Image: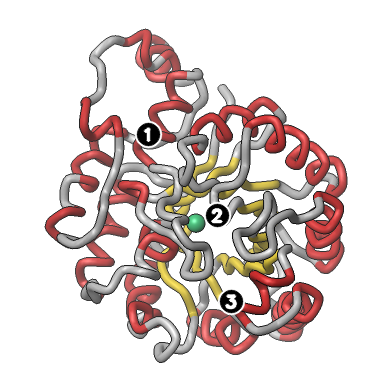
Amino acid sequence: MTHVHIREVGLRDGLQLVKTLVPAEVKLEWFNDAAAAGVPEIEVTSFVPSHVIPQFADADAVMWGAMGRSGTLASALAVNLKGAQRAYDLGVAKLNYVVSASEEHSLSNVRRTPAVAMEAFYAMVAERKERGLEGSVELSCGVATSFGCSLQGEVAQDEVVRLAVSAAEAGADEIMIADTVGFADPVRVRTLFKAVRDAVGDIPVAAHFHDTRGLGLANVLAAVEVDIHRFDASLGGLGGCPFAPGATGNINTEDTVYLLETMGLSTGIDLEALLALRAKLPGWLPNERIGGSVQRAGIPHLPKSFPSLARAMADPVA
Ligand code: ZN
């Protein structure tokens, strides 16, 4: 059975614009519940200066609390080499970095061109080598605004592929292609992901979609069709981007798991346990818009809705 790797990004992407400061204990309860539900990777926090995003002032404490749980990869975002150094000091097993393919988005977001932003990734790779952490710390490089950007408009596919190849050649263990502002559609998803996959060779390619215009899950389906088996998703569809006006909401983890399982793909996630965690969100984040169709309607209790689960029950060793 084909396994699809889900990375829960609610604690990072989902919380970065949220005004309510969520206490570290709550973040760890969120992490532990998601891990217990079988989520294989959870992006726990962002190593960013706390004056830039106060929500992540507790990054070290939350990361420390989340690390070392077997069966769950606790990853984090590092926005620059300094952030990566903090993460290396703590012993983080996987670090995610993102460079924006849109020059205007990159300049607004980090005041650096994509080429200069890429140099920070090279520095993170070099530092990993210097510390002898190759093989023990994974580095993922994401390309944001891969399908266009509300500031610049169009982003050339060649530019996205070029950045992905640079990251791969530098030593990235994963390439992540992000539709930061929700401009992607299934036709372009197939074309771009195929182009990136063919250009970077054996390195896994992950997808990060937003549901801004209702195409989030259609884009997941299109990506699966070109053999993409790694997806970012956020519980309750939380998340956005400060420089992408109207870009509210990553794809929803619960709905994504439901889609993939109905397709006969295995996520390893217990959807009922995930929904129990999802039910806590409105209490933790009373001022946020929290969405989700499966949460609203419930899981239909028909084994044929979950062929992979039904097969697993019939054949426990599968
Ligand atoms: Zn996002």
Badge 1 crowding class, 10 Å Cα cut-off, few under 14, some 14 to 19, many 20 or more, is many
Badge 3 crowding class, 10 Å Cα cut-off, few under 14, some 14 to 19, many 20 or more, is some
**Which residue is located at x 63 percent, y 65 percent?**
151
Cα separation between marks 3 and 2: 13 Å
Considering the numbered disc 2 on the image, is that residue within a helix, a strand or a loop?
A: loop
Q: Earlier in the sequence, mark 2 or mark 1?
A: 2
| Residue 255 circle label | 1
Please say if the residues under marks 1 and 3 sit with CB atoms less than 8 Å apart.
Answer: no
**Which residue is located at x 68 percent, y 49 percent?**
147
Answer yes or no: is residue 136 visible: no
| Residue sticking out furthest to the left | 283
Tell me: residue 152, above or below residue 50: above
Please say if the residues under marks 3 and 2 sit with CB atoms less than 8 Å apart.
Answer: no
Badge 2 crowding class, 10 Å Cα cut-off, few under 14, some 14 to 19, many 20 or more, is many
Answer yes or no: is residue 257 visible: yes
The amino acid type of the residue labelled 3 equals Asn
Considering the numbered disc 3 on the image, is that residue within a helix, a strand or a loop?
A: helix
Cα separation between marks 1 and 3: 29 Å
User: Where does label 2 land, which residue?
Assistant: 181
